[in-house]
Image (cartoon, helix red, strand yellow):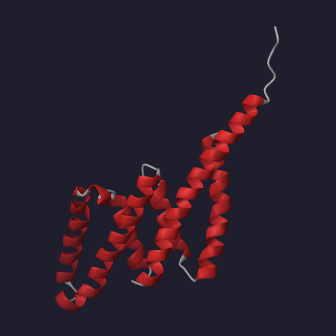
Amino acid sequence: MSPLIAIAITTGILSAVWGWVAVTLGLISWVGFLGCTSYFASSGGYKALLQTMLCNGSGMLWALLLIHGDAWWGAGMAGYMMTGVVATLMCVQAKQQWLGYIPGTFAGCCATFGAAGEWRLILPSLVIGALFGYLMKASGLWLSQKTQKAQTSTAVVDPA
């Protein structure tokens, strides 16, 4: 089986499982899917999983700064300017290798705005979602490898 088809199958199965887990634990399913998507868009592997989680988390913190910071700088033009400053800093932090996955940072930030800053739900949703993304891809690659080996071992060899 091709890696794409195998990953599609495991992603479908684990997406259904994630939906159930999110409801059971009272988490935000769409935020988890942002964590999952963040992982899928990364370079892949265990290090990318950790980097995805760190960047999603840092994006959440940047969003919380903006959400709660308007009490300091007010709404209107100052708020727009702070959004620009924070967006710049979200990119600049990528100079640190572990915070170098800028799309993951912006995904965490967007999730936080979309979920009204409910970080107690956002953080576990992002982390578990990223774990599910890792499992979706890893299990799909495993399935592809196993089915390709099975196809190779059952192939009929021409004795001539």
Q: Where is residue 16 in the image (x, y as percent from the top left)?
A: 66, 67
Quarter residue 115 falls in:
bottom left
Q: Where is residue 131 in the image (x, y as percent from the top left)?
A: 52, 63
Name the residue furthest top: 160
Name the residue furthest bottom: 71
Report the residue at 62% width, 49% height from top. Answer: 140
- Placement of the N terminus among the 4 image quadrants: top right
Specify whether 19 is left or right of 76.
right
Report the residue at 73% width, 29% height from top. Answer: 152
Viewer-side residue, 133 vs 63: 133
Query: In the rendered picture of this protein, how many numbered marks are placed on residues?
Result: 0
In the image, is residue 48 above or below residue 74? Answer: above
Report the residue at 42% width, 73% height from top. Answer: 111
- Placement of the C terminus among the 4 image quadrants: top right
In the image, is residue 91 above or below residue 156? Answer: below
Specify whether 111 is left or right of 99.
right
Specify whether 110 is left or right of 36.
left
Viewer-side residue, 139 vs 90: 139
Specify whether 75 is left or right of 7.
left
Q: Position of residue 155 (x, y in %)?
A: 78, 26
Report the residue at 64% width, 81% height from top. Answer: 24
